[in-house]
Amino acid sequence: VTQSEEGAITGKGEVANCTILFTDIEGFTEISETLTPEQLIDALNRYFSLIAEPISRYGGVISQFQGDAVLATFNLPKPDADHAANAVRAALAIQSVLNGVEFGDGIAFNTRVGINTGSVVGGLVGSGDRVAYTVHGDNVNLTARLEQLNKDYGTRIIVAQSTRDAVTAGSFDFSELGDVSVRGLNRPVRIYTVAAE
């Protein structure tokens, strides 16, 4: 995958190391039942606009909107030598930009984030004029499962050991949560949460 001078993504695909960021809104199913269809779409569009800005600011590329979830990558397809740190910066900025924002009468979108660094397959998929850039692989699946673990730990951001190892020591205020067994992996994963400094 390469980028043209206009920024369009071209090519058949590649395997590359990148940092994946996955977000999801806490309790979204219950929230959606309190909104009219028009209110729900308006709220989601506003929410996506708010969180897309810090992702883009730190060099991430959103490859999928999945209901209320967002999948973004750093270092693929846009090269970024500091991709792990920039993904963490984006996650912290997402929490900051959503702080105090309401998407209806007293409705907040509390967003959970999973971050993981590893090898993925990225490329354009689709048919005819309906083509989109996406990423696949075990590391993408792991990132989504890390996001879900926030429910168990009462956290908003969970970062895999691979991402923590890829950032400069002392760059962030990481707190170790321990080792967890993740469905689909035959080895435990050490996870951390991170707070704004």
Image: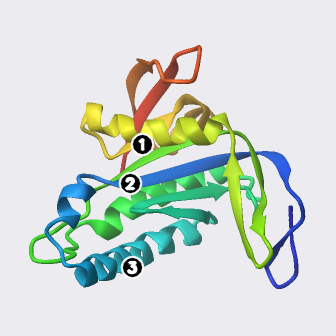
Residue 28: horizontal and vertical position, in percent? Answer: 26, 58
| Image coordinates for residue 54, horizontal then vertical, percent | 49, 69
Amino acid at pointer 1: Glu
Of residue 87 and residue 32, the one placed in the foreground of this image is 32
**Residue position for label 3:** 45
Q: Is residue 167 visible?
A: no
Image quarter where the N terminus lies is bottom right
Work out whether residue 159 or residue 47 is closer to the camera in this orientation and state it: 47
Question: Disc 1 or 3, which lies upstream in sequence?
Answer: 3
Q: Is residue 151 above or below residue 124?
A: above
Q: Secondary structure at mark 2?
A: strand
- According to the picture, the residue beneath numbered tag 1 turns out to be 147
Front position among marks 1 and 3: 3
Amino acid under label 2? Asp
Q: Are marks 2 and 1 in contact (CB under 8 Å)?
A: yes
**Cα–Cα span, label 2 and label 1:** 7 Å
Residue linked to disc 2 = 24
Number of numbered callouts drawn: 3
